[in-house]
Image (cartoon, rainbow, N blue to C red):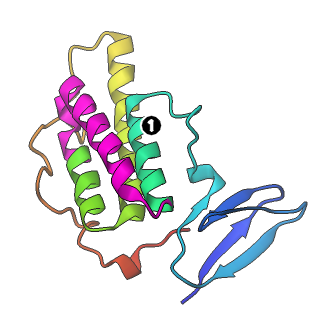
Amino acid sequence: MALKVELKPGERIIIGDSVITNDNQRTRLFIEGQAPILREKDILTPATADTPAKRVYLAVQLMYLSTDIERIQENYFTLVNDIVKAAPSTIPYVTRISNAILTGAFYKALKEARKLIEYEGTLISHVQTGSAGLPESEPGGSVTEGAGSESADESRSPASVDQG
């Protein structure tokens, strides 16, 4: 089944190693094949990767788009070791990202890395407001939550992952 992507005027998309820019009207594409696909809204650049979690996302993005992932994986593991040392409550997020990478599910790893970015924002906002810690209801508030186990989302087959 083809992936349906609608592009806004001027919106860009990466398909494989090509960047495609839409013209001045809305366009609908039906894409078949196995090439990596990223919409503009999901693309981070080195300039916009300005936090530890965003740098993790960027490393995963580069692995997803690259054919030479071994070089990038070394940088990824350095980044996640640093973020876990600084904020041990990120372990469940990092575990889900790493498990997806190790199974070759890079798009799934990107989705999990997006959750890490959101969690990082929560941590930063608590620090800025002077809170002593996270409320008990926060998903990453427990270090052991989700560590080493699969969530319901991770048990889905790669064919059922929607990239749109």
Q: On the rendered structure, is 90 left or right of 9? A: left
Give the main secondary structure of the magenta stretch. helix
| 76 up-or-down from 8: above or below | above
**How far across and how far down the image is residue 29, in percent?**
72, 77
In front of the other: 142 or 104: 104
The residue range painted magenta reads 66-93
**How far across and how far down the image is residue 79, in percent?**
31, 35
Residue for badge 1: 54
Q: Quadrant of the N terminus?
A: bottom right
Residue at image point 88% right, 64% down: 25
Q: Secondary structure at mark 1?
A: helix
Q: On the rendered structure, is 141 left or right of 97? A: left
Q: Residues within 10 Å of mark 1 (few under 14, many from 20)?
A: many
Residue at image point 38% right, 62% down: 106
Q: Quadrant of the C terminus?
A: bottom right
Residue at image point 72% right, 57% down: 12
**How far across and how far down the image is residue 108, in percent?**
37, 62
Q: Quadrant of residue 155?
A: bottom left
Magenta span includes 52: no
In front of the other: 77 or 156: 77
Residue at image point 38% right, 13% down: 128
